[in-house]
Image (tube, coloured by chain):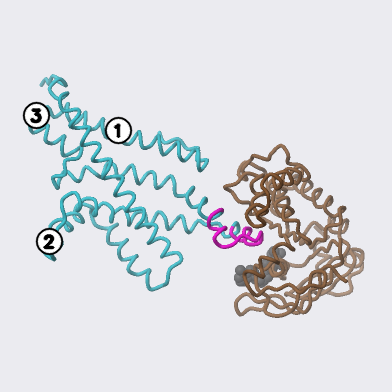
Amino acid sequence: MPHLAIDNLNADYGATPILRDVDLSVERGEIVAIIGPSGSGKSTLLRVLTGLLKPRSGRVEIAGEVVNYTSAAALRKVRDRFAIVFQQYNLFQNMTALRNVTIAPTIVKKRNAAEVEREARALLEKVGLSHRIDAYPDEMSGGQQQRVAIARALALKPEILLLDEVTSALDPELVAEVLDTIRTLASEGMTMLIVSHEMAFVREVATKVVFMADGRIVEVGPPAQIFDAPQTERCAEFVRRILRH
Amino acid sequence: MSYTLQFGQVTPYLGYLAGGAWLALQLAAIAFVLGWAIGLGCASTLHYGPRWARWPIRAYVVFFLNTPLLVQIFFLYFALPDWGILLGSFQAVVLGMSLNAGAYLTEIQRAGFNSIRQAEVEAAETLGFTRVQSIRYVVLPHILKVLFPPLSNQYIILTMTTSIAAIFGVEELTGRTYNINAQTFRSLEIFSIAALYYVVLTLIASAALYAVGRYFFRIKRSPF
Ligand SMILES: Nc1ncnc2c1ncn2[C@@H]1O[C@H](COP(=O)(O)OP(=O)(O)OP(=O)(O)O)[C@@H](O)[C@H]1O
Ligand SMILES: [Mg+2]
């Protein structure tokens, strides 16, 4: 049984259809990279999965269980299962790194504060930030903030991690530290959907690459297929263009 | 021309003046709290409220921001009795200052609502926060931090504006200064001392606000 099954998913912004008939199957521990031109709906797909945007139709299953996006209460259950990290980190500016990580388990899960803090310290250590635990976001570099955001996402022990261009806002020299963190998670068997323009990284870690255009999945295949022998003209053209840089 | 400073003549009045300063402080504090509440109500209605409620609020703000405070209080004090509403001088001044401050504080707090970072609210949402938790832990701390400096400034401005009450016979700091001047004619001395009292009132408030801002909101800007 796939870990994540997306079946015929459609979503709109207002009256404009954005996602059209998206089908995708992800096995446990898979690292799925989503690539495609700007505006192709990559972020929208992740937003629909986390419940930030309601799908018009279609079905999402996690480990065979249908995800219910209809009510606020049902949505809070979705939030246990997916965690998302954004391009702009979106950390809570009024909280320290540690508090950013502990707050959701504490107030959402109502878990024991001391235990949550122990776990949060371990998570921050894992992303290489034990020395910045008491720093506020505006006192950290972009790479550090993004690693805190990853730790914050992991604090709820999600089943599936969604990463939306998490290195795009970073200076080149800070990209590597964030990619290292993602590599570690990949090696631990976390199921991930990664929207990324870091093609070398995608080729290295992805088990599967999804090419999207105009809100549709145009081609899916292992990195070797997508980058070296794409089956569709659109994908071939996109890959040619992006690899020339 | 020579003028010999004779502070000795006015020292007996220092306590009397301090009483006036105390009244000025009360005026400023009451007007600030009422104005803040009015402003919060109006600003949140502008941000979250129904469309029809925005017009009366806009009219109120535009009217009070574009007419002199003195005229507003004159209106409350002299014109309202024609409609059977009799206000004491203190009440008229407090009401006028509150309504006036309310208009400014509506504008200020509206900026606070507009500065809410939607991305953080979304992050809270994806982490499973309820709407109330998101307001309590993310939106409010941010708004308070953004608003703290302009609210502080507004309080300081109100402190000095209280002197307008003297015109209506309220014996606050300026009113009492005027009284002493009429009795002693030591103008230079007495008005210098009055200025000093105002400085003390505003400096104490600035220092306290600075400490609060620094402790609760990590605002490092110095007030001086
Ligand atoms: N809040 C919104 N309201 C209306 N339309 C939107 C909104 N957000 C995105 N869109 C539209 O939806 C389409 C898909 O956008 P999306 O952000 O998913 O693209 P993307 O593949 O993530 O692009 P990029 O690589 O630039 O991040 C675009 O045409 C965009 O203009
Ligand atoms: Mg995007």
What's the magenta region? B121-137
Q: Name above or below for residue A212 compared with residue A187.
A: below
Q: Find out if the beta carbon at label 2 lies less than 8 Å from the nearest ligand 1 atom.
A: no
Q: CA distance from mark 2 to mark 3?
A: 36 Å
- Mark 1 belongs to chain: B
Tell me the residue that label 1 is attached to: B199
Q: Find out if the beta carbon at label 1 lies less than 8 Å from the nearest ligand 1 atom.
A: no
Q: Is residue A34 magenta?
A: no
Q: Quadrant of the C terminus of chain A?
A: bottom right
Mark 1 secondary-structure assignment: helix
Same chain check for tags 2 and 3: yes
Q: Give the chain ID for the brown colour.
A: A
Residue A55 x %, y %: 68, 76
Q: Earlier in the sequence, mark 3 or mark 1?
A: 3
Which residue lies at the image location 13% right of the left edge and 36% below the top edge? B178
Ligand 1 falls in which quarter?
Answer: bottom right
Which residue lies at the image location 26% right of the left edge and 30% below the top edge? B196
Q: Give the chain ID for the cyan colour.
A: B
Tell me the residue that label 3 is attached to: B185
